[in-house]
Image (cartoon, rainbow, N blue to C red):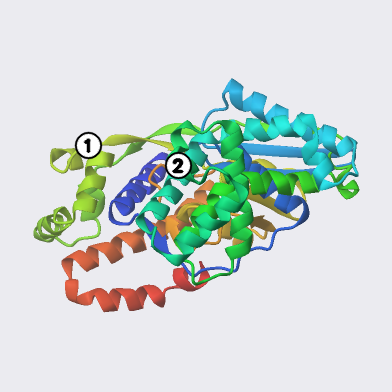
Amino acid sequence: MAIAEENEFYSKLCVARTFKGAVEEKREKEINLSGVDKFSYNLATILARDREVVAVNLRALSDGCEISIAKNSVWLDKDREYVEKIKETLKNVSKDAPMSFKQACGREDMRDLILTIVEYCSEKLRYTLNKLRWDITEYEDKVYTKSFLDYVKTKINDVDIFDKIDVLNNEEKYTISSVCCKYYKIVKQDFEIPKKFRNHTRKVGSYIESLFNIVNCVRNTKYKDLFFRIDLKLLNPDVVIQPILPWNGIVKKFLDHEKEYEGFMEECLKDPTIGRRLKHMYGGVDAELNCVSSNEVYLHAELNLLTSVMNHEEKRIFIAVSKKCCYLCELYIRYVQEIKGYNVAFSGSHKSLKKLCSRWKLPDTFKKEFMSYAQLELDRIIEYEIKLCTEPDSELECIEAYLNSPFYHNF
């Protein structure tokens, strides 16, 4: 019975994902990070390579700390070497604390670590640099673009550096990241500059900003005992192949008769986004929707880490995540907080638009209870989308029902 319930849950998740790429929620207040929470968040940033998601939890011990890290892909040898290098460098800097920021950054081991971080994150850095370059090219006549380039000229001799993104060496990448980091601090609250442009400069500077914040932490005598010994715990990803029931079988449960299904399918296929998602998840839009299929699902990094550290009996658990949490992760976190009473805080749970991920895996902790709980929400999403397609005139009614639902107000 439990397996059948799980199959239905994952199948409904895939159906909901074909309709909705993301779910709107009430935006929450951002957490103001400081101390070791800020350290954890910055560590998550420099550990995220390419499109990876990394989650970090730091727990104080009597003679040091334990840092648990999870990510959504396998730990390669080069990942382990990279994490070990960060650990040893931070321990050595902390051992010699206190020192000035300039002294810490001038150390040979720290200069070497800076270039190692730039190399490790180079693909992600190149991606964000290209976004910034596109902004500069597209809006070259705008005052804010000219102002940014004028600022770059005061820091870098080669203002054409944005035309050489694909051939920059690590020293040059570090330089442009540092410049963007400083520039963003100046324009952060300048709302006359488009938010997208400001965000692109922030992202380019985020790796160096994160490292500088980490340096400021470990050079401080206050944290000397915390970093005297660092125990690393790298969590392996939890991945399984999950059977998925036929798409049309799930959808028909929400419709009264076959004729209604045919009309609904016709409306669905008029939407190119839905058609593309159906082909991606089920392999096609014809007979494929009537077949059992399979889907690789994985436990998201933040939940892998959360369920691993929940038994530590800490008064408060903080988990830093390198990206914003998805919709079901957010729902699970709030379930653990509000229904189970855990004092849990996350850095990645403050965005109004939450992605619905079809490869999301249920955590083993509270699995049965949460599955029943979350399935009600998936039902609501599917019912809402079906009603919009079959009864176009009822859109306002659907929206009003959603806004008045307990899910919107409580979660």
The image quarter containing residue 81 is top right
Q: Which residue lies furthest to the top in this view?
A: 77
Q: What residue type is labelled 1?
A: Gly
- Horizontal side, residue 149 vs residue 66: left or right: left
Q: Residue 118: where, in percent of width, then height?
A: 60, 35
Please state which of residues 173 and 292 is positioned toward the viewer in this rendering: 173
Q: Residue 307: where, in percent of width, then height?
A: 62, 44
**Quarter of the image with the N terminus in it:** top left
Residue plotted at (43% across, 37% down): 297
Which residue, given by chain and number where applicable, does mark 1 sit on? 283
Residue plotted at (41% across, 54% down): 135
The residue carrying pointer 2 sits among few (fewer than 14), some (14 to 19) or many (20 or more) residues within 10 Å by Cα, namely some
Q: Is mark 2 on a helix, strand or loop?
A: helix
Q: Is residue 194 visible?
A: no
Q: Is residue 377 visible?
A: yes
Is mark 1 in CB contact (under 8 Å) with mark 2? no
First of labels 1, 2 by sequence position: 2
Q: Residue 232: where, in percent of width, then height?
A: 73, 32
Mark number for residue 146? none
Mark number for residue 127? 2
Residue plotted at (79% across, 37% down): 106
Residue plotted at (63% across, 43% down): 44
Q: Residue 185: where, in percent of width, then height?
A: 63, 60
> What's the distance in space between the residues labelled 1 and 2, CA to CA?
30 Å
Q: What residue type is labelled 2?
A: Tyr
Q: What element carries label 1?
A: loop
* Residue 141 drawn above or below residue 12: below
